[in-house]
Amino acid sequence: MLKKTVPLLVVLSVRELPRVATVAVVSLAIAIAANAVHPMQLPLLTAKGQPGLPRWVASRFHAVDAEEAMRLVENPKVMVVDTRDTDDFSQQHIPGAISLPYHGFDEHYSQFTASVSKERPLLLYCYGTDCGLAARVAKRLMIKGYTKVTILRGGIKAWEAAHLPLETPAVHKGE
Amino acid sequence: MRISVRRIWRRLGRERTVHTALRIGIGLVFVYASLDKVIHPDQFAEVMQDYEILPKTVVNGAALWLAWLELVIGIFLIAGVWVRAAALMVTGLTVVFIVGLSIAFTRGVGLHCGCFSTDPGGDVRTWTSLWQEGLLLLACLWLAIQAFGELTRRKQGPQKIETNSEAVRP
């Protein structure tokens, strides 16, 4: 019984392949069409940049290197935003930065928006070149209405590599 | 009276109501799982990126496709259209999800399952996610076996009759 049934099931499964392929192709076509009209339209292939960044977001914020970021940090109008986890922020961060972590964005956002106006220029950073958290937070902030968003290319690693100053909160200084 | 598990299994397998309930149930699960992904494809792409399985270049396309694939297959199952093909696809997709979750667990990457929600604050990946997917796989396998089993019985039926008719031929 089993000897006959299993090969028959395999043959029948192979026979279903044209339908499987049709469903797969139709789904892909619908996905491409829906993406074309979606407000968060994504590039289908991301040669560079982060996945999940809509075209309009990617085109509106720009990235700067550590030296350029230092000039922005020295400008009192610019708010520096640390998008890493709160534990990492509390150990070390760029001077004057405030914490708005990607993991827990919704919980921290209300406090952030109460103290930072939407017109204020922002400089966002995360761990390193590939972390992508700064870009994700930048997207969320731009959706909320923040328009002047800049990202530190290479994150805090690039900042450290350029021997720029870091702030260590008092509680960690003695450790 | 002896209770035979095999007999109950066979009976359930032939029961049309069970088959229909399973088909619609799995269809609803897939439609529900796809909705948040279809509405927030950008967030789903982020979740997929966190699994660190696919190259960055194709993550957006894969996220868009997967979300709609789940929705379309779910609708096909609920509507009862191309059930065998849809059953094969849900089984295949669930295997892919289990492999993805297992890789993420092994490597310790990614925080969010992305199973039913794309919200980074919710749907945290735990061992429960893997158990859920395991149960879903069992249901999908049963649906596929039932869907094909019906066809197999139909295919095997005339052969038996033919053999019997040959046997009684003088």
Image (cartoon, coloured by chain):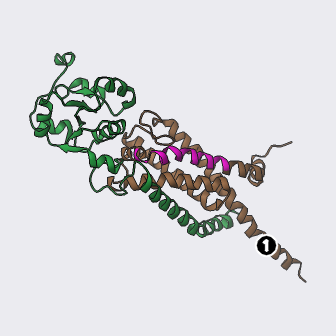
Chain colours: A green, B brown
**Residue at 24% in and 35% down:** A124
- Asked if residue B36 is among those painted magenta in the image, a careful observer would answer yes
Q: Residues within 10 Å of mark 1 (few under 14, many from 20)?
A: few
The single residue placed furthest to the bottom in the displayed view is B170
Q: Secondary structure at mark 1?
A: helix
The picture places residue A38, in percent across and down from the top left corner, at: 44, 51
Q: x and y percent of residue A12 in the render?
A: 63, 67
Q: Which residues are magenta?
A: B24-42
Q: Going by the image, does B86 lie left or right of B124? A: right
Where does the image place residue A67, in percent across and percent down from the top left? 10, 39
Q: Quadrant of the N terminus of chain B?
A: top right
Residue at the location (29% across, 48% down)? A58
Q: Residue furthest right?
A: B170
In the depicted structure, whether residue A5 falls above or below residue B126 = below
Question: Magenta region's main secondary structure?
Answer: helix
Q: Is residue A108 magenta?
A: no
> Residue visible at 27% across and 46% down?
A60
Determine which quarter of the picture holds residue A166.
top left
Q: Is residue B25 left or right of residue A18?
A: right
Q: Which quarter of the figure has residue A66? A: top left
Considering depth in this image, is B151 or A109 the residue closer to the camera?
Answer: A109
Residue kind at label 1, given as amino acid type: Pro
Q: Nearer the viewer, residue A50 or A79?
A: A79
Q: Between A150 and B24, which is closer to the camera in this rendering?
A: A150
Which residue is painted at 67% across and 61% down in the image? B148
- Residue hosting label 1: B158
Relative vertical location of residue A146 with respect to residue B28 in this rendering, above or below: above
Q: The numbered mark 1 sits on a residue in which chain?
A: B
In front of the other: B170 or B118: B118
Horizontal side of residue A120 vs A164, given as left or right: right
Residue B128 in picture, x, y percent from top left: 52, 36
